[in-house]
Amino acid sequence: MGFALDRLGPAECCRIAESLLTSPKPQSDRIWSDCPHGHEQSKNQTASWYKPDVDQWKCHSCGEYGDLISIYAIVNNLEAGSPEAFRAFASEFVPGWEADGEVPIRRKTVPKPQPDWHGAPPDMPPALWSSKAGEFVDSCVAALPESKTARIHLSDHGINLAIAQQYHLGWNDHDRYYPVTSWGLPFQEGAKGERKIWLPAGLVIPTYFQDRVAKLKIRRDGYETGPIKLRDRKYWEGFGGSKLIYVVLGNPEKVRVWIIVETERDAYTLMRAVSMLPWTEHIGAVATCGSGKRPDAEAEKFLRRAALILNSLDTDNSGRENSFKFWAREFPNSIRWPVPSRYGKDVGDAVMPLRFAKLKSSSALDRFDWLIMDSMYLDIAAWIEAGLPHHVRRELDSLIPVLASLPSPAPSPEKPYFDQVLELLETMPLWRDELESFRDFLKANTLKIFMTREGRPWVGCSDVARYKDQEVGAVVFQARQRFHDWRVLDEWVGKGSLEDIVIGYFNGRLEVRG
């Protein structure tokens, strides 16, 4: 029995709690309310509860618990469990307590010893299942570039076509059904004869283990209109696949830093950002497919020998609990590195494009890949880099080949670099025409594109003395206006500028001035 309940009784504890909590809602033997800390606000003010008859408080939002004095301390910006909080509460609600009372001391409980943990062996499906799944994945990989819906879905989450093809993401354009025995599984009775492996239409996300497909997951297309009992299932996992194996993106023999997330799609988003960092080969992503899922024996090996594990499980209660009760205990090389709460609970919440809410062009991803990355709520690459401790970053730097620090080779003499890049834009005739026209304009007026020390491109003269000529000044002004002006260059995507293209393709080749 707590001090407040002992001295005041349940009724008075109830009255005090209602005066301290925000939007209290008495129900049965509890008082429900929002979190006293104000971390999250639930729709029905039911994030936390207090039971006056036993003087117990628990918050499902922040995970804290205690008694009425704990609530009082939080509301009054005092340290919960401290002598100062106790004295303040007792002085306000229990006059004369000093005559016969002592300040209670919060005693630390000795943690229970944890049994040794080791990952279970990988649970691979039958070889025939993997073979059939591989054939299905190959057909879907070939179909993905032609699917406008798939490309838009990927680009909306910061995943470009190169990453999708590297990790064998595919697109299934219609529901498919395969008898379980045809994929090497034992016969099972279904609703209409033999049970079928259902693979619905949508984005195909395979999991590989030792070059074999171990699991199939599909992000369903049009799940809102599917069978009523499945309309809340955005993802569907193909029957018969592995239940333990993690999605591992990166070579375990080379990766020194692993970033752990819950969903496969978030892992691919991370790898797109990792591709923009200098340590691409040495940073990998792991999708656990659930905050409570533990590594299998093979994953345990490479995670234990990693220089660093960035634990980026969701910031909900389950993610926080598993981060500290399992990952921090079992993997001392892990640090908690969640997405900042203002961006959402996970990487997927943090990467919805600001500039293009919906990309309507099937090739928009490749054309405006740099624009999509720039328009994310959170710069994922910078966020990853910020999470690397100094000693880990020093190790990663030591792994970069010496050749990587050397200057890029000069363009071939017969073709300036500007023209070489234009050849890559064959699929973008409108943008290509604008670039070629602007290049010719710059040549005719002996102008160039430079880079400021702050990292922004600008148009100017190679010879500074030419600025004194008023006609030259007018031409420079015209060129800069054309360079920075936003206008519709592609009817599918909307407005853009030549500056955006230069930032995306030519940044590393521009002379720095100013």
Image: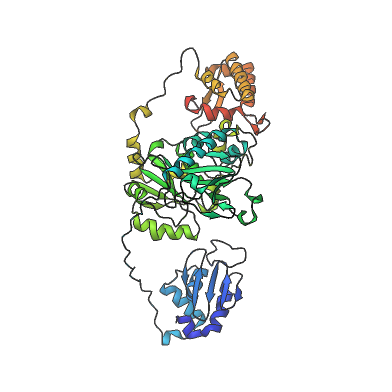
Q: Where is residue 485 drawn, in percent x and y?
A: 64, 29
Q: Residue furthest top?
A: 414
In this picture, residue 282 sits left or right of residue 159:
left
Task: Please report the residue visible at 42 percent of the width from the left and 72 percent of the height from the top.
Answer: 81
Question: Which sits in the foreground, 494 or 81?
Answer: 494
Task: Please report the residue visible at 53 percent of the width from the left and 20 percent of the height from the top.
Answer: 418
Task: Please report the residue visible at 60 percent of the width from the left and 72 percent of the height from the top.
Answer: 24
Quarter of the figure with the N terminus:
bottom left
Q: Where is residue 179 drawn, in percent x and y?
A: 53, 47
Question: Which sits in the foreground, 179 or 125?
Answer: 179
238 to 12, vertically: above or below = above
Q: Quadrant of residue 368?
A: top right
475 to 78, vertically: above or below = above
Question: Which sits in the foreground, 311 or 409?
Answer: 311
285 to 506, vertically: above or below = below
In this picture, residue 405 sits left or right of residue 444:
left
The answer to whether any part of residue 428 appears in the image is yes
Q: Residue furthest front?
A: 193
The answer to whether any part of residue 380 appears in the image is no
Q: Where is residue 379 drawn, in percent x and y?
A: 51, 42
